[in-house]
């Protein structure tokens, strides 16, 4: 896109997210990506809670991006912020929620996407033996995915992060076990130690690019995207409204123009299995 061509774009990360983000952004937008190794994104919160995240993910990713731009003397940047826990639609399944934001201060643009994925190895467990530790490690896709060991789930002292070597894992466990008679093992959710999460960040970056390339039909501003979903797609059997999406509303953050896309899934009725009346 012309407004981004040949400009420097900062990727605000210290966890190697540029490995998947930069190739996509450079090819699609014509930018030259870089990182600032002196900017500490851990100051906005860590997964192991030595630094608590004080704001919601959207506020945090905005602060991260803006402060990184100021520290790097740049006016175009991208940042991401991830959260892990129960899926919004099911408390029994863990999910990875990623916000990715582009800020263009030169053109007064802020464009954000949210990606929620069930593809995550996020987990943690107290283990009392090397056998339990081994079983957890195998389920967590170790050693391709890093692990973290600590004395207990809430203990912030003596945390061993980024474990990707089996011998290191056993040594760290034996040290903690010798003191506490148990240890708490958890998945390392930092992107550089978690290929599964990195793949979700890559997917979210692709979604961001698609939104950036979607321009407002009225003022041609990039970032024309979905801002609301209207539910109520009718049941094909009884005609009652269901919770399925009937239409999406797209709007422009600059001029306010909006338009509605009806039947976004290319179907005009919903299967009765999703109807609260036919399948209570």
Image (spheres, rainbow, N blue to C red):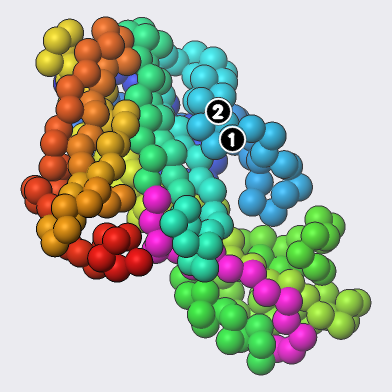
Task: Report x, y in % for residue 243.
Answer: 31, 50
Quadrant where the image shows the C terminus: bottom left
Residue to which mark 2 is pinned: 59
Vertical side of 139 occupied by 65: above or below? above
Q: Is residue 95 left or right of residue 31?
A: right
Residue 212 visible? The answer is no
Quadrant where the image shows the N terminus: top left
Q: Is residue 126 located in the magenta-colored stretch of the structure?
A: yes
Q: Residue at x 91, y 77 (%)?
A: 179
Q: Nearer the viewer, residue 6 or 95?
A: 95
Residue to which mark 1 is pinned: 56
SS at circle 1:
loop
What are the residue bounds of the magenta stretch? 116-130
Q: How many marks?
A: 2
> Extreme right residue here?
179
Task: Report x, y in % for residue 125.
Answer: 68, 74
Q: Residue at x 72, y 41 (%)?
A: 52
Q: Nearer the viewer, residue 30 or 49?
A: 49
């Amino acid at each position: 896109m012309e407004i981004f061509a040949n400009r420097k774009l900062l990727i605000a990360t210290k966890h190697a997210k540029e490995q998947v983000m930069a190739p996509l952004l450079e090819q699609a937008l014509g930018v030259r990506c870089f990182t600032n190794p002196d900017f500490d994104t851990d100051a906005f919160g860590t997964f192991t809670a030595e630094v608590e995240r004080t704001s919601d993910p959207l506020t945090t990713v905005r602060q991260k991006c803006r402060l990184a731009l100021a520290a790097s003397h740049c006016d175009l940047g991208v940042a991401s912020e991830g959260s892990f826990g129960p899926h919004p639609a099911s408390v029994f399944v863990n999910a990875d929620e990623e916000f990715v934001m582009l800020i263009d201060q030169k053109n007064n643009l802020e464009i954000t996407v949210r990606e929620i994925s069930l593809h995550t190895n996020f987990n943690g467990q107290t283990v009392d033996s090397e056998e339990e530790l081994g079983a957890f490690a195998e389920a967590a896709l170790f050693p391709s995915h890093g692990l973290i060991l600590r004395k207990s789930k809430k203990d912030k002292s003596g945390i061993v992060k980024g474990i990707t070597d089996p011998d290191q894992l056993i040594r760290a466990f034996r040290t903690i076990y010798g003191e506490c008679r148990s240890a708490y093992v958890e998945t390392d959710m930092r992107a550089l130690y978690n290929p599964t999460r990195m793949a979700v960040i890559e997917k979210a970056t692709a979604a961001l690019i698609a939104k950036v390339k979607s321009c407002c039909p009225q003022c041609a501003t990039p970032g024309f995207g979905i801002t609301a979903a209207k539910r109520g797609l009718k049941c094909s059997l009884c005609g009652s409204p269901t919770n399925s999406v009937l239409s999406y509303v797209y709007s422009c953050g600059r001029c306010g123009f909006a338009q509605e896309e009806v039947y976004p899934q290319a179907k005009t009725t919903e299967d009765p299995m999703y109807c609260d009346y036919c399948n209570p």
